[in-house]
Image (spheres, helix red, strand yellow):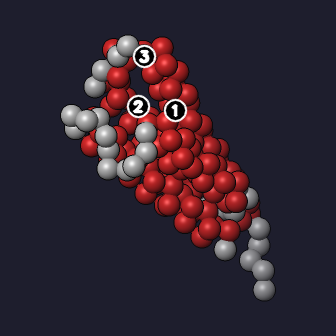
């Protein structure tokens, strides 16, 4: 049951990250610099992006003692998506604006969150390998 809850949280988190990324893409391509969500950048990042990261961490905690390889994969995907989004912003020239020091802090902290999710995915992968090895050594119960 815990594995299903964790996977559901991670899928919901992935959906939030995709919606967030799509909104940023629309905002960066529109002349008004507004996305389709009725939030400014700070609220969008805090609520949607922060919520997605929080849900991912909660999912890791829920599934940490269970054998659940999909949890590792989804943590890698969510963290990678966050980092890829920040790399895309950098390549668009987000650091060349007049608020470049604030942009550097925001991009740096956001990339750190993506790195944390990737690290949790690696930790979960290592834990899953230990659980699988333990299961192979134990005799089948009747």
Q: Which residue is mark 3?
A: 99
Q: Is residue 103 left or right of residue 2?
A: left
Q: CA distance from mark 3 to mark 1?
A: 16 Å
Q: For this rendering, which residue is in front, 96 or 61?
A: 96
Q: Marks 1 and 2: in contact by CB < 8 Å?
A: yes
Q: Position of residue 132 (x, y in %)?
A: 66, 60
Q: Is residue 124 visible?
A: no
Q: Which residue is mark 1?
A: 110
What is the crowding at mark 2: few (fewer than 14 residues within 10 Å), some, or many (at least 20)?
many
Q: Is residue 15 left or right of residue 8?
A: left
Q: Viewer-nearest of labels 3 and 1?
A: 3
> Label for residue 1?
none
Q: Which residue is mark 2?
A: 86
Q: Residue 34 occupies which quadrant of the picture?
A: top left
Q: Viewer-nearest of labels 2 and 3?
A: 3
Looking at marks 3 and 1 on the same chain, the residue that comes earlier in the sequence is marked by: 3
Q: Position of residue 27 (x, y in %)?
A: 29, 39
Mark 3: secondary structure = loop
Mark 2: secondary structure = helix
Looking at marks 2 and 3 on the same chain, the residue that comes earlier in the sequence is marked by: 2
Looking at marks 2 and 1 on the same chain, the residue that comes earlier in the sequence is marked by: 2
Name the quadrant of the C terminus.
bottom right
Residue located at (54% from left, 41% from top): 46
Mark 1: secondary structure = helix
What is the crowding at mark 1: few (fewer than 14 residues within 10 Å), some, or many (at least 20)?
many
Q: For this rendering, which residue is in front, 44 or 137?
A: 44
Q: For this rendering, which residue is in front, 83 or 52?
A: 52
Residue located at (50% from left, 60% from top): 12
Q: Position of residue 86 (x, y in %)?
A: 41, 31
């Amino acid at each position: 049951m815990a594995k299903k809850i964790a996977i559901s949280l991670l899928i919901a988190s992935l959906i939030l990250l995709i919606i967030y990324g799509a909104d940023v893409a629309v905002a960066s391509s529109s002349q008004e610099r507004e996305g389709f969500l009725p939030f400014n950048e700070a609220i969008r990042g805090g609520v949607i992006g922060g919520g997605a990261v929080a849900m991912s961490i909660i999912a890791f905690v829920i599934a940490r003692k269970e054998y659940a390889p999909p949890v590792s994969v989804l943590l890698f995907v969510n963290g990678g998506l966050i980092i890829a989004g920040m790399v895309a912003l950098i390549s668009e020239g987000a650091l060349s604006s007049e608020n470049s020091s604030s942009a550097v802090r925001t991009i740096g902290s956001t990339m750190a969150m993506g790195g944390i999710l990737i690290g949790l995915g690696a930790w979960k992968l290592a834990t899953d390998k230990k659980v699988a090895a333990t299961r192979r050594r134990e005799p089948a119960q009747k």
